Amino acid sequence: MDFKNVIFNAARDGKLRRLKAFLDHRSPHEVMMLVLTKTNGATPLVMACRNGHQEVVEYLVDRCNADIEQPGSVVFDGETIEAAPPLWCAAAAGHFSVVRFLVKRGANVNSTTRTNSTPLRAACFDGHFEIVKFLIEQGADIEVSNRHGHTCLMIACYKGHYRIAQYLLCLGANVNMKSVKGNTALHDCAESGSLDILKMLLVHGATMDVDSYGMTPLLAASVTGHTHIVEYLIQYPELVTRQESIDALELLGATFVDKKRDMFGALELWKRAMSIRFQDGLPPIPKPTQLYTVEAYEHTREIRAPEELDDLLADPDEMRMQALLIRERILGPAHPDTSYYIRYRGAVYADAGKFSRCVTLWTYALDMQQTMLEPLNPMTQSSLFSFTELFSFMMGEEGRANSRGRRVPPVAFQDIMCVLKKAVDEVTIGVAALEKLPGDRDPSHLHRVLVIALHLACLLGRLEPNLMPEQRHSALKLLYSLVSLKVRGRGGQTALHIACSSDATLVGRYPACRFPSASLVGMLLTVGADPNERDDAGNMPLHLAGKTGPYQSAVQVIRTLLQHGAHIDAIDGDGTTFWPHLKVHHNINHLQYTKLSCLAAKVIRRYNIPYVGSIPATLVDFVTQH
């Protein structure tokens, strides 16, 4: 019987009698070892605190001497919290009696999780006022922020917990403290729509500051569509300038178009903004001159005159382009919402069967992200992945009519080439960025972008039979630039390893292509990929392909690798050769791919003939791998 799991489950489920039955008769040392052992990252005490089993908590602490500071992993609202102390777990879950007991036994009220979240901040998050009050009375620091710089006051404001925010302000909490990204508690109120708390913050001296994106709380309310916050703030000229009121109303109108799908409401907001621009008795504030038009917006120009607004309702598509123009002008290309709503609009067009409009908009958004964001940013990854889904869907449904009667067109070679080039560019700058980092480097983001790039290349390979010679040449040239980077992803895998591994297939609604892919492997080998490179586990691409199973695609991949010089009798990281897989891939004649040099190397290894120093150094690795 696995006593560790039995004890853990009993603590998690509050089964005190069962817990005692397994622990009471054991030695103190054995009890200590069992209660300190983690299951799925958590100790029995952590789970008992998480689930509010006070009797179990008291037993583990008082009878079993469990460490009240030993952290563990727990799940809240689907998110795993790493290195959470028992007190943090009890405070976050709202178990006041457990909190009180742990503090009485000496638990540190300012202990933190891996993200520097305190028990007090955890209690503020879910509005456990009595726990908040108790922890502060016991010495909890109200100004400790998490790794993102979010304070207890900020999270209380964001979650709309008025009593907690009021209590913290009465204790002197810093009302204008900024997070790492520059937002304040006032921003959090505006984003969440908590007007009563926002009014209270202003009374306590909160200022209308900007965050790292240049966003004021007023603009934050406009982006999220909280009309009541916008209407309240723009009535105070001492808080908001005339230009800020205009921007807020215009941005709120864009939100009405894209988020609320309220065209009439958007038009009224834009009319109000226009009336403020040309208010009687005040100098006019015309819109900035639009120096150029954007193809993705169909070269739409932003409306500058009041009389032009009434014509918008007759052209909803024009109105949607106006919303994108307004958002980009006010928020700027660096703000995540700018590219997000461009992508959203593109997705709507794709659903309507207007795939060329979608590709144009998504390409524009991707250009924006690659220009403004750091290399390998998750938003950029998401955009690239969306293209693989779109192209895969189009290839699978080509020629069929969608629900609106539109036929799905073929994917254009130039469209895939354009996105693949951007993916290769992202890999290139990602490699350079990782090389600049000190110490151990996490290749997970680079690995994902590399996988996406290879899936795009795989889709390109499906077009190969119909490509012109110059198109095929440009495709191979682009793949050559990827292979020549000699980039390695997770586990030291090269591009060829990934193309040969069934584990690398992207998961999505429309699988782009299945790995191993014979066409992709063939293209990679054509441009110089080494079939005998090893990953961190000592596997060559041949070993990964051989483990896939007796599928036709795997057999084709294996043949292609062998034809390009892969050593059929080379050993993998476990010291085994490809031979066992021949029983699966029975239609491969191993003699056809066995070389005399390989046979000689095997004889040297079989009879333990000393070879280091006796043969040229360039041959040592060749002999060693047999």
Image: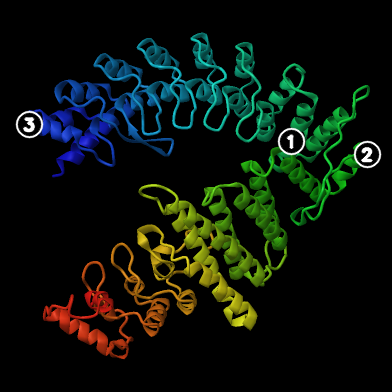
- Which badge, 2 or 1, comes first in the chain's sequence? 1
Q: Position of residue 322 (x, y in %)?
A: 79, 45
Of badges 1 and 3, nearer the viewer stands 1
Where residue 447 sits, quadrant-wise, is bottom left
Could you say which disc has been placed on residue 157 in the image? none
Q: Residues within 10 Å of mark 2 (few under 14, many from 20)?
A: few
Amino acid identity at mark 3: Arg
Locate residue 113 relative to residue 208 in the image: left or right: left
In the rendered image, the vertical position of residue 601 relative to residue 497, given as above or below: below
Locate residue 388 relative to residue 243 in the image: left or right: left
- Which badge, 2 or 3, comes first in the chain's sequence? 3
Foreground residue, 28 or 206?
206
Of badges 2 and 3, nearer the viewer stands 2
Residue drawn at 28 percent across, 90 percent down: 591
> Alpha carbon of mark 2 to alpha carbon of mark 3: how far?
86 Å
Could you say which disc has been placed on residue 26 in the image? 3
- Which badge, 1 or 3, comes first in the chain's sequence? 3
Q: Which residue is mark 2?
A: 307
Locate residue 193 relative to residue 301 in the image: left or right: left
Colouring chosen for the image of the structure = rainbow
In the rendered image, the vertical position of residue 371 relative to residue 451, given as above or below: above
